[in-house]
C-alpha cells in the first residue's frame, strides 16, 4: 500500500467518524479539523452555527486559544472547525485571513463575524449565543 493509499484510507475513516458524529444533528463535542474547502462547506451547511479557527501550529497565540475553542466545542451548540492555514492556504485566502489566529463565525452557512487574535471564552460564547437558532437578532 502506498502513502497515497494510506492517506486516502485515513481521510475516509475521518469522514465516516464525522458523519457518525453529525448524524444526530448535534454539533460535535470536539473541534473538527478541516481537510479542504469542500469539508468546510459541508460543516457550514450541516450546522446552524460554526466557529472556524484559522490557526498555525507555530503560532503562540493560536496555542493559547486551543483550550478555549476545545471547551466551546463541548459546551456550546456550535460546531467548532479548525483550519491549519499552512495546509489550507487557499481556504485561508478565500476568507481573507491575513493573521492568525483568525476566527470566523458562520450562521446559516454565511460568515457573520470575524475576529482576529486571542479572545476570551465568554466573548466567543456570547457571539455563538447571539447567532444560535432562536436568538433575537
Image: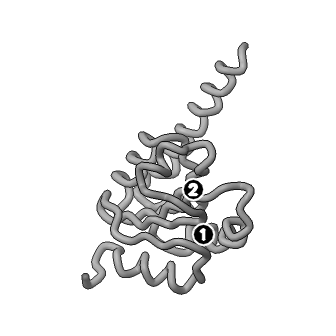
For mark 1, give the secondary structure: helix
Give me the C-alpha separation between circle 2 and circle 1.
9 Å
Vertical relation: 85 (above or below) 108: above
Q: Picture quarter containing residue 65? A: bottom right
Quadrant, the C terminus: bottom left
Q: Picture quarter containing residue 132? A: bottom left
Picture coordinates of residue 73 (x, y %)? Answer: 56, 67
In-front residue for pair 123/49:
123
For mark 2, give the secondary structure: strand
Q: Which mark is residue 82?
A: 2
Vertical relation: 14 (above or below) 113: above
Picture coordinates of residue 113 (x, y %)? Answer: 39, 71
Quadrant, the N terminus: top right
Q: Which mark is residue 80?
A: none
Judging by the rendered image, the residue that carries numbered circle 1 is 69
In-front residue for pair 26/48:
48
Picture coordinates of residue 28 (x, y %)? Answer: 53, 59
Vertical relation: 64 (above or below) 42: below
If you read the primary sequence from the N terminus, does the residue marked by circle 2 or circle 1 appear first? 1
Tell me whether circle 2 and circle 1 mark residues in contact (CB < 8 Å): yes
Q: Is residue 86 left or right of residue 96?
A: right
Instruction: Look at 34% across and 52% down and name the residue there.
Output: 45
Q: Residue furthest left?
A: 137
Instruction: Look at 67% across and 66% down and name the residue there.
Output: 62
Q: How many marks?
A: 2
Q: Residues within 10 Å of mark 2 (few under 14, many from 20)?
A: many
Q: Residues within 10 Å of mark 1 (few under 14, many from 20)?
A: many
In-front residue for pair 86/66:
86
Amino acid at each position: 500500500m502506498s502513502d497515497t493509499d494510506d492517506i486516502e484510507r485515513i481521510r475516509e475513516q475521518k469522514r465516516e467518524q464525522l458523519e457518525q458524529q453529525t448524524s444526530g444533528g448535534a454539533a460535535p463535542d470536539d473541534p473538527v479539523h478541516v481537510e479542504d474547502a469542500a469539508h468546510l462547506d459541508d460543516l457550514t451547511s450541516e450546522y446552524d452555527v460554526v466557529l472556524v479557527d484559522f490557526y498555525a501550529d507555530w503560532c503562540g497565540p493560536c496555542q493559547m486559544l486551543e483550550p478555549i475553542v476545545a471547551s466551546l466545542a463541548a459546551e456550546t451548540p456550535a460546531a467548532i472547525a479548525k483550519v491549519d492555514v499552512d495546509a489550507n492556504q487557499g481556504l485561508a485566502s478565500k476568507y481573507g485571513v491575513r493573521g492568525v489566529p483568525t476566527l470566523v463565525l458562520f450562521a446559516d452557512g454565511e460568515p457573520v463575524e470575524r475576529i482576529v487574535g486571542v479572545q476570551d471564552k465568554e466573548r466567543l460564547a456570547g457571539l455563538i449565543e447571539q447567532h444560535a437558532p432562536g436568538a433575537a437578532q
